[in-house]
Amino acid sequence: MAENSRRKRFTKVATNRVQKIIDYLNLLQNCSNRRNYEYDEDDVNHMFEEISKALKDAKAVYANELSKGNGKPGFTFNK
């Protein structure tokens, strides 16, 4: 598959998925209405700790993939 085609596919898929994440975060904000929901500070902290963990894990996967393609070879002896 051509590089340009893979790039287009990434931008299309990633754009849609990022927008879905943003949309779901906006829906989660709706749960903040204390007239309709009961929660405490521990609940809020737990939710956002899990979201932060998932975000950190996803970012680590991208960082790992980017480091693979940096063109730097691993350890070698000079001959």
Image: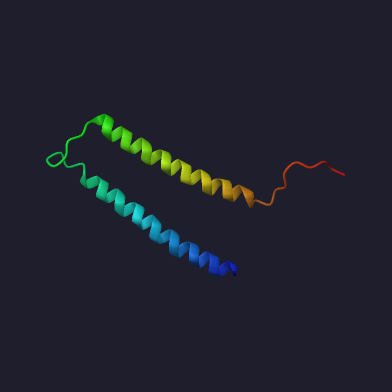
When asked about the image quadrant of residue 36, the answer is: top left
Q: Quadrant of the C terminus?
A: top right
Where in the figure is residue 18, as x and y percent of width and height?
Answer: 39, 55
Q: Is residue 26 left or right of residue 52?
A: left
Extreme residue toward the right, this view:
79
Identity of the residue drawn at 49% across and 62% down: 10
Asked if 26 appears above or below 77 in the picture, the reply is: below
Q: Is residue 37 left or right of residue 8?
A: left
Identity of the residue drawn at 56% across and 69% down: 4
Where in the figure is residue 44, as x and y percent of width and height?
Answer: 27, 35
Q: Is residue 68 left or right of residue 60?
A: right
Count the labels in the image.
0
When asked about the image quadrant of residue 38, the answer is: top left
When asked about the image quadrant of residue 17, the answer is: bottom left
Identity of the residue drawn at 33% across and 38% down: 48
Taking depth in this image into account, of 38 and 77 the one nearest to the observer is 38
Identity of the residue drawn at 63% across and 52% down: 69
Q: In this view, does 66 lie to the left or right of 50?
A: right
Asked if 44 appears above or below 64 in the picture, the reply is: above
Asked if 44 appears above or below 62 in the picture, the reply is: above
Extreme residue toward the left, this view:
35
Q: In which quarter of the image is the N terminus?
A: bottom right
Colour mapping:
rainbow
Where in the figure is residue 46, as x and y percent of width and height?
Answer: 32, 33
